Image (cartoon, rainbow, N blue to C red):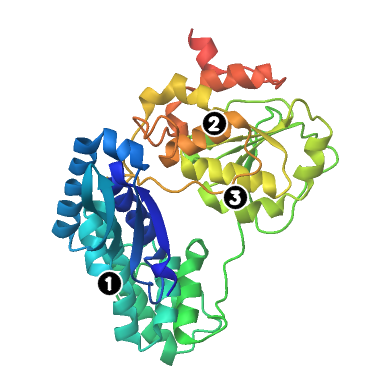
Amino acid sequence: MAGSRARGVDAAKAPEAIRDIVATYLARHRYDATPAWPLTFTVRWPDQRTLTSQAPDWHKANNTLRDWAQHQGCLTTLKRRLMVTPVALIDTVTVADEATALRVVGGQGARQYRKARTRIDLLTRELGVSRETSSAVAKTLDRESDTDIALLIRAARFFATHDAAGMTPRQVPLAGFSAKWLDQTHIKRRDAICTLCGKDSLDFSERPTELRMRWLDPAYTDEPEMVITKAWQPARERKVRFVIIVENKDTYQGMPPVRDGLCVWGCGRAIEASISLLPWLGAACEDNCGDDYGARVVYWGDMDADGLEILDAVRQAGVRCRSLFMDIEAYGRYSWFGTNLKPEGTPIATRDPKATPTLNPGERELYRMVCGAGSSGRPEYLRVEQERIPLVDAVDVLRSFGWQVINHQYEEDQ
């Protein structure tokens, strides 16, 4: 079996090294249909001269490793080495099975592994699917709550015997479910249901993608907000030189007048789909590109992992936008506005950073930090919300980009 391949560890730090390797193995293989065991470790001892000259230290290391292995329930083999007199040193340590591995690791690593295996067992038992299928679904929905996994099982049973073709997700008669539980933002749940039911698609009738915008140019600010569901571009007589995409509604509504300006409400991750309704943006920003990205189109979102992933997605969609207050320098200036709580009061979780090829070094450094993977460890706050940053500060930066911001209320108050 793959798990039996020997791994070398230095004798002086063998218990710690074995624990770290086993923890990594459990994390990587917790969603395997059948994790491979055992894990065997070869203990590396120093050369004969060092063993002899430092015999008391190596006797102690051998006794420590022996006692640790016995306490954890690990199997060991011995080999004879000369340390003044012949001594039986531990040659290999074997973690024979899952139960032993969990004792070795303990703590959060063991809890995460048990959670994954419990979910695989639950899906297999409740829905009668193979462990391979259960493993794949459980891995896909790793970040879903236990409540959502229970709802998934109920939904899979429903769709296995009912046809919801032509309905919108909110019209499906699933008792006890939020109307938003199967929205397009939860595509992984839909895919998981299809996998569990053996279907290619749930054949929903989707709501059209929607995007909200408002004019910032004072000549048009009395006009109502625009809501578009089809590809749109401004009329020839309306010059659009500056476009700002903002993540949150308060900032969208509060943006000051900008001559030849347009404000787009990204509405969080919804912009990843709705940006396609403005196909001219990619070409438009090419006209005024400076530095790395054109100042003509600006994206301003939260300083958190989601916000920076959205920024990367917008750029990958072809919009070469400059970010506003979304790099490590901005975090240093505004981190005291930060939070570690979601709107409902639950903690914001750390995550593994994704590939974000369009982020510049300052943005990428911030992204890794707010994922909890920065070189200095977890920051004080994992989120600095866009709305907390004073608009007067945004005006100063936009003007430095060449934007024609006019009659700003905060300037008038000073």
Where does residue 234 sit, x and y in percent of width and height? Answer: 78, 44
Q: Are marks 1 and 3 in contact (CB under 8 Å)?
A: no
Specify the quadrant of the image occupied by residue 405: top right
Specify the quadrant of the image occupied by residue 217: top right
How far apart marks 1 and 3 lie (CA) works out to 36 Å
* 241, 343: nearer the viewer: 343
- The image shows residue 214, relative to residue 333, as above or below, that is below
Q: Secondary structure at mark 2?
A: loop
Where does residue 195 sit, x and y in percent of width and height? Answer: 49, 80
Q: Which residue is mark 3?
A: 271
- Location of the N terminus by quadrant is bottom left
On residue 326, the disc is 2
213 vs 320, left or right, is left
Which residue is painted at 58% across and 25% down in the image? 256
Which residue is painted at 63% across and 33% down in the image? 360
32 vs 238, left or right, is left
- The image shows residue 355, relative to residue 223, as above or below, that is below
Q: Which tag, 1 or 3, sits closer to the chain's start?
A: 1
On residue 118, the disc is 1
Q: Secondary structure at mark 1?
A: helix
Q: How many neighbours does mark 1 have within 10 angstroms: few (below 14), some (14-19), or many (20 or more)?
A: few
